[in-house]
Image (cartoon, coloured by chain):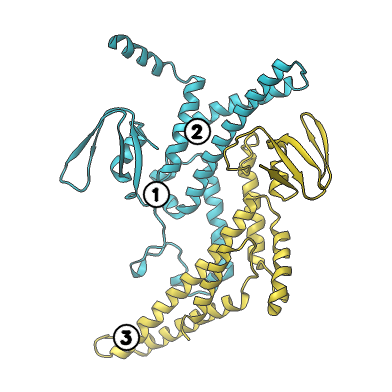
Amino acid sequence: MYGELGYKLVVHAKRTQALNQLPPYQTDIVHAVTREVRDLHGDIDEITKSYDGDFNPSEDPARACALLVHHLCIRRNKRCLLAYHRVRAEKIEQMCWNGMDVAEQAQAARVTEGDDDVAGTSSHALSPEEDEYARQYGDMLAAYKGQWTDIDLTGSLEPPKDLFIDVRVLKDAGEIQTEYGAITLSKNSQFFVRQGDVERLIKQGFLQKLS
Amino acid sequence: MEDIDDILREFDSQNAPSNAKDYDDLLKWWINERAAPEILQCQEDLVERIMTRVRRQIEQIEDQTGNLDPRANFQLIIVQTELERVKFLIRSYLRTRISKIDKHALHILSTPSIRHLLSPSEQTYLRTHQALLNELYLSSFLKNFPDNLKRLDDSAGGLSMVEEPDLEGAVFLRVVRDVNVAIAWENGETLDMRAGDVYVIRYSAVQEAVKRGDVELI
């Protein structure tokens, strides 16, 4: 049916917004919607061609209506596709800003999705195009960030309250160097450290901030 | 008494840019940027001045760590705390601008007067980002579309694809200097705003006043 697949994409996009991870890319639906657009466009061409350029809508309202519906469907499908890809692209950008490894996240998403969605096991979370996008966006971000090394643009957007915070180590993170010497972060230990030194590790899930 | 105050005030504003004034300015522009629906002039010089000081302070801190004198240590902590705060301000300021740039990308790109409000590095970011997005759409599905549907800035069907900032939204503001603003919904009527007053008003009415610094958003 017209537009049904487009709607599915939008539902997927809506769902993606609420998720932490990126669900697998819906290659089949995207292809099907694109095909629908091409077919509709072919139909339009055929109809207009059969009239040889002098088509009078008031003489043949049925045809005119068909043309209009085709046109609207194509535009709607385009909007659905754009919305779907835009949401995913924004998700990817967000991951880049958060300093997460996009490829790794995608891997994790595939594993969790695979549990409840058997068909999803073979599909990739990112399409090859998105992979490429993630890589290039990461490069661009690094370039922009490089101009502000002292600020660390990807740092926390919470206003800093305390210079030093209590953290608990959730995963072994090895040894880090601080201005006050080296600290070995072994699992389940607790430290009182400078926030700026460990912000990265908190974001990556190695440490937990204790309030 | 008033005369002396006036002279003092004049002297104060001439004495810029001092450290404290720069900090206040940064605070002001950060709040303005966060509250205004559209992107404002990038305060490049201001940020640059502050960054120079930040770098100097970082050096100073590095020099003094290891100093075990408790008094120096305490002083260091205060300096570091302030440094973190300034860093947060700049970070948040730049990130707010980036998020606006992403949101209204096509609108900014197609309007040269707005494009000039961006710093060179922000312009590079905007262009590269849009090129990447275009490439993603194109390679994912647009390449299979008929040619007349490949555009991303169409306004066919009464619906523009370019997202613009909503200038009619209401903003809270405090008046810094007495100012007269035209109210759009009455014929040529103007509103006298006195310094120190607080208003809630349509952003489009005070757009120019914000840019001149006559009012500040809160």
Q: What residue does disc 3 label?
A: A64
Q: Nearer the viewer, residue A155 or B69?
A: B69
| Colour cyan maps to chain | B
Q: Residue furthest left?
A: B187
Distance from label 2 to label 1 (Cα)? 20 Å
Distance from label 3 to label 2 (Cα)? 56 Å
- Image location (x, y in percent) of residue B202: 30, 46
Q: Nearer the viewer, residue A166 or A185?
A: A166
* B4 w.r.t. B13: above or below: above
Q: Which mark is residue B111?
A: 1
Instruction: Kindly tell me whether residue B60 is visible in this rendering.
Output: no
Q: What residue does disc 2 label?
A: B44
Q: Residues within 10 Å of mark 2 (few under 14, many from 20)?
A: few
At 49% from the left and 79% from the top, the residue drawn is A37
- Image location (x, y in percent) of residue B85: 58, 32
Judging from the image, what secondary structure is the residue with disc 1 in?
loop
Same-subunit check for callouts 1 and 3: no
The amino acid type, in three-letter code, at marker 1 is Thr
Q: Is residue B25 left or right of residue A26?
A: left
- Image location (x, y in percent) of residue B199: 30, 38
Same-subunit check for callouts 2 and 1: yes
Whether label 1 touches label 3, CB < 8 Å = no
- Chain letter of the residue beneath label 3 in the structure image: A
At 35% from the left and 44% from the top, the residue drawn is B171
Judging from the image, what secondary structure is the residue with disc 2 in?
helix
The amino acid type, in three-letter code, at marker 3 is Ala
| Colour yellow maps to chain | A
Judging from the image, what secondary structure is the residue with disc 3 in?
helix
The amino acid type, in three-letter code, at marker 2 is Glu
